[in-house]
Image (cartoon, rainbow, N blue to C red):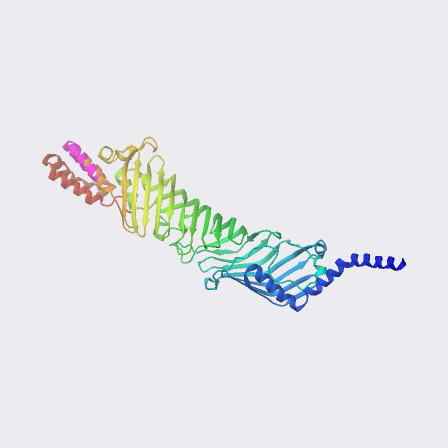
Amino acid sequence: MPVAAGLAGALVVLVMLAPALLTGWVRAQLKKDGFRARMEALFGGRLDAEVTLAPLRWTGDEVTVAEAQARLANGWRAEMNGLHLGLDWAAFRQKTWRVIGAGADSLDLVFDPAQVRPGSASAEMSGDGGGKGPSIPAWLRSWLPDKTEVDGARVERFSMRHPAGWQVAGAHLKFSPWLQGDGSLQLTAESGVITTPLTLETLREPVKLRLDRAALRLAPAEAHLKEADLKWLDTAITARGRMRMEDKSWSLSANFERLPLAEVLAEDWRLRLTGHLTGEVELAASPGAQPRAKGRVTLKEGALTALPVLDRLAAYTNVERFKRLVLDVAETSLEGTAGAQVFDKIVLQSNGLMRLEGRLAVEGEKLDGSFLLGVTPETLRWMPGTQKHVFTLPNPNGPDGMVWTTLRITGTRSAPREDLSSRILQGAGRAVLDAPGEVAAQAGELLLTPVLGKDAATAPGTVIKGATEAGGKAVESGVRLLEGIGGGLLKP
């Protein structure tokens, strides 16, 4: 009996000490030289990658790795410096591998399409299978943990480069806790600079964004940008997006506030058009295709000034407000690529003066626009015949109290053409034809004085008066004279 009791007591002690003995054995295994090779095989199998680890250095329960590199089959290469993590042995005794205090000094991601391995499988973010574990006696396996937890990780400096033009530099990453079986990783990025492939004619380099904060979800099949707070110059931008790993397609939506026009307009327009833009834009692209954009943009506190067309309108109508045209409403929808855009549902309105509605297509340098132009009758009182012969269309959806006509815009961006000037002059000619001789002379003088000055305007009065007496040829001569004087009323 004493012997049996002693054996039983020894067995109880052994059982009680088994976790501690196993922990010590595992610690010893982790610090052996062969463990690094097994970890390279393990992570390589999980990630479908070629993984290389620098020698492991243990300090207590924390391990550091000076360098680590992974070449993934999908073309990405990851390089980490100053990798460190610890193991929670209390969780180990509860059959859980718990990684604590994980992080790295830097993480660099580079995509090289030449390194893509055809037919490779994407890695699954799971905690089971893959790789060869340490050689463990069979009787000890039942004591080992059967699940894995990571309580989060930090990367102090993150960078990313993609040949399509996307780059990230100087960001801080924070990974959320991860549990075995989760098919994705959640992380946040803070600070840093994002370089995009997007360009503007006014900038010599691609658009760069300052990153305040971004929340992302990474999965084997796709990456989601749940929300990002960005700044370009002093413009606040909120963005969301997605990238599909299989076909490398991506989409991005962005809302922006107070984008100064001075930053996006060509130099010769910066003094002519002022204000700031607010709106939302969606971008989408796939390999081999240009990014397509669509959205809605509104101009706030807009004003047009220093345009010859406005000066001529002020002269024709005797309305000084045309010289500096305040845009109380200015908005449009847009869709297209860098080479061709369509601006639809355009609305430009200066309260109590004019409203422009329509559509403009831009293909390269070519312009093609169709509009309805509405003005208040008071603006036409010094333009004979325009209300009777030109501004004659109804617009039941427009503001009350306006008269309307069509406007066609053609030509090129450097040399736009419009059809309204000639119709205004023709209307004036017809009004002169309909008027008695003395009134016709006065109307002609009123029409031409703002353009030619009083002395020059008086002389054509004889020609216009003669038009009512001599018939068609004289009328034709008068209209041609007016057309020559007015040439290109709405051309900048």
Q: How many marks?
A: 0
Magenta segment, prevailing SS (helix, strand or loop):
helix
Q: Nearer the viewer, residue 403 or 461?
A: 403
Occupied quadrant, residue 381: top left
Percent coordinates x, y for residue 242 in the rendering: 48, 50
Is 404 displayed left or right of 152 in the figure? left
| Residue at position x 67%, y 56% in the image | 97
Percent coordinates x, y for residue 178 in the rendering: 61, 52
Percent coordinates x, y for residue 362 in the rendering: 32, 48
Occupied quadrant, residue 318: top left
Relative to 392, residue 195 above or below: below
Name the residue at the right extreme: 2
Q: Nearer the viewer, residue 31 or 270?
A: 31
Residue 54 falls within the magenta-colored stretch: no
Q: Nearer the viewer, residue 13 or 480?
A: 13
Relative to 10, residue 395 above or below: above
Percent coordinates x, y for residue 353 in the rendering: 33, 36
| Residue at position x 63%, y 58% in the image | 102
Q: Which residues are magenta?
A: 424-442
The quadrant of the picture occupied by the N terminus is: bottom right
Name the residue at the left extreme: 470
Relative to 68, residue 211 above or below: above
Is 108 displayed left or right of 163 in the figure? right
Residue 436 falls within the magenta-colored stretch: yes
